[in-house]
Amino acid sequence: MIYFILFFILLFLVEVYGGSSLVVCKRRFPKIHLLVFLGLFFLIGLRNQSVGTDTITYIYEFLGETKEWNSIFVENPEPLYTVLLLLCQKIFNNYTAFLCVFALPISFAFAGYLKRYSEDYLISTLLFIVLGIMGFCMAGLRQSVALAISLIAYRYARERKILPFLICCLVAYGFHNSSIVLIFIYPLLAIKKINFKFWIAFIIAFVLGVTRNSVIMTVASFFFTQDRYGIYGTVYTSSLNYTMLIIQGTLLLFCYFFRCKVIAENKDNATLYIMAFIGIIFQACTPILGEFFRLSLYFSFSLCVLVPKTIAVQEKLQIRKLMYFGIIFLSFVYIFLSNGSIVWSYIPFWR
């Protein structure tokens, strides 16, 4: 219940101080994104070591033997994570401070992402929870940093700044090799028309995933390092269900019907649709290899701003309200009914 209390306090403050486009606030806080940042940082960083499937592993690594600096770039396929780990070992002796260091980039990057692109902070923050991104950031420390950098990379790609974009891709790759998929974002900006062909691509990926076609494993070998592929591709058996695929697909279908209006406001919004399609295509491959959800995360972020944009382009206020409160209601229902959600196992650091 502690998670619920903290979570609802965050959403309440976001709502009260102007984080919603449909609620008129007498006290509007112009830097509401900072409130989102602080709330997420508190929840992700100040958690108990038992929260998150891999958290305790990272903590043992943090409290374990310090590696030699001269071996970092020779022995480690993801050296920047090791560099940050060694710095934390030199500076801190408390695991909470260590977790806060890794909570900082994702909280900061997501808050900046909302400030720049979101039409409604409340909906975006809710979807950050519903899409499983926040829960994953409490489990995968390395990839949470890579995800944060991917949000910054998207900004530079959208602004057509290729050098900063490539630097971001390189830095993200140094934290988690799966971030190699980010390199596709820049060329996707050239696509300005979204049609049914993207759904056909999704259906093909879904069929390949359900039938456990070997093509999926061939594709996977391009996105994971040899060691990681050896584990995920030959030993790991996926037990993921289709819940997240249904959620992503439903949200994308909702946005797809109004794509013309959203893209008309800004042609670069087409990239958000393409990223969302790539996200569900990767998610459709999880029946044969569950680790494809890691790749999906780099693109499902787009739904956090695409859904609010879809609501904002509705001309009739009643329709906007119906969509707005409908998504909020369904999101809360899912959060409450999701037994596997992080909300049921969340414990703060002081307990």
Image (cartoon, rainbow, N blue to C red):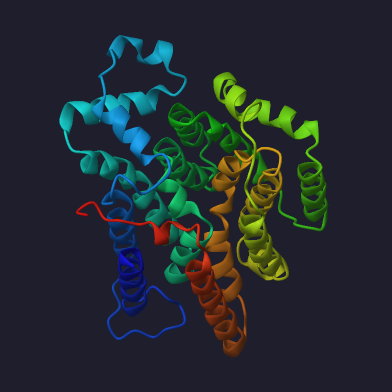
At 23% from the left and 44% from the top, the residue drawn is 96
Would residue 108 appear left or right of 268 to someone viewing this image? left
At 71% from the left and 65% from the top, the residue drawn is 253
> Is the residue 261 above or below the residue 111 in the image?
below
Kindly tell me whether residue 166 is visible in this rendering: yes
At 58% from the left and 26% from the top, the residue drawn is 231
At 52% from the left and 29% from the top, the residue drawn is 177
Would residue 234 appear left or right of 83 to someone viewing this image? right
**Looking at the rendering, in which quadrant would you find the N terminus?**
bottom left
Q: Give the residue furthest to the bottom.
A: 318
Residue 67 lies, in percent from the top left, at: 29, 16
Work out whether residue 286 or residue 255 is closer to the camera in this orientation and state it: 286
Quarter location, residue 185: top right
Work out whether residue 54 or residue 260 is closer to the camera in this orientation and state it: 54
Kindly tell me whether residue 267 is visible in this rendering: no
Residue 315 lies, in percent from the top left, at: 62, 83
